[in-house]
Amino acid sequence: MGIKVGWDITHQEFTITDYYYFSILQKEAERFGIEIDEVDDWESLDKYDVIVFNYPEIPFTENEGKDVERWVWKDGKKVILAGYYKNEDKIADTCNTLAKAFGMELNPDEVTDEVNNHNGDKYFVVTSKIRRYNKNEKNEVNVQKIVLACTASIKPIMPDIKIVVRGEDTAKSNKDNYPLLIAEQIAPPSGGYFCLAGTCVFWDNYSITLYENLNFSLNMLKHVPPSKGAKLTIGP
């Protein structure tokens, strides 16, 4: 049985069906048995094991935040939230209406790299510091380097946050933040995950063709939590 991903558009995110931006991701995902559905009804997201919020422009309500917490902590789902740099369109503020509950915040900064970049452009940060989603289902390393364009950094506010990707030592934040670019909180015992990315364009039609961005993106979407339905008591 293939993996089904719910790609939310209830918060004015970039749509997965936008051919200009995301046709490669959708086509390659289908080739590897990953079905990505565009979802315009919040209640329908509950049926997916992997849920993506890619550049949400509408803040999440308190009740929606509680739904996401339940999906991750109780139901063992995986949620991916992707932002952008410099708090464009108040994206950091919007993402943080959801991310704070999972122990992290998207900083309103920009991360650049004068040394490790693509085509001499410091905003296209290239890194080999990839701690998760660098292996395929056979446990073979298939991701050595990726590029993260126009990325913000992430601030951990709880001690159990895991590094997924960080910048090289040459990467710099314009606000002197540590260049943590993608981070995750794992939810034992449910097996759920909440993943926050500093940029939403690492898997668009331009970046996904560079380095191992395609493999990284597919590895991230293919990672279904190992156990679902484990009992966990969470607050109201």
Image (cartoon, rainbow, N blue to C red):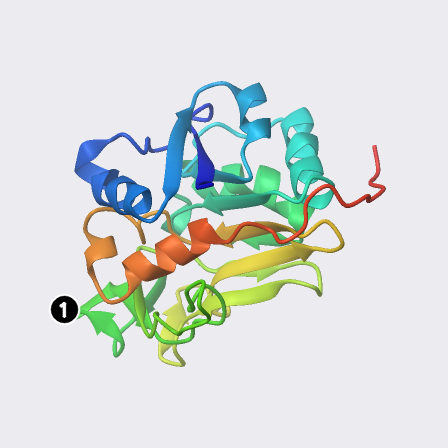
| Position of 176 relative to 60 (above/below) | below
Q: Amino acid at mark 1?
A: Asn
Is 228 left, or right, of 184 in this rendering? right
Q: Position of residue 69 (x, y in %)?
A: 69, 39
Q: Position of residue 221 (x, y in %)?
A: 44, 49
| Position of 98 relative to 184 (above/below) | above
**Residue in the image at 50% along x and 70% along y:** 178
Toward the viewer: 183 or 6?
Answer: 6
Quarter occupied by the C terminus: top right
Q: Is residue 53 visible?
A: yes
Residue 65 picture quarter: top right
| Position of 158 relative to 12 (above/below) | below
Residue with the most extreme front position? 1
**Residue in the image at 51% along x and 51% along y:** 196
**Residue in the image at 19% along x and 51% along y:** 206
The residue singled out by tag 1 in the image is 119
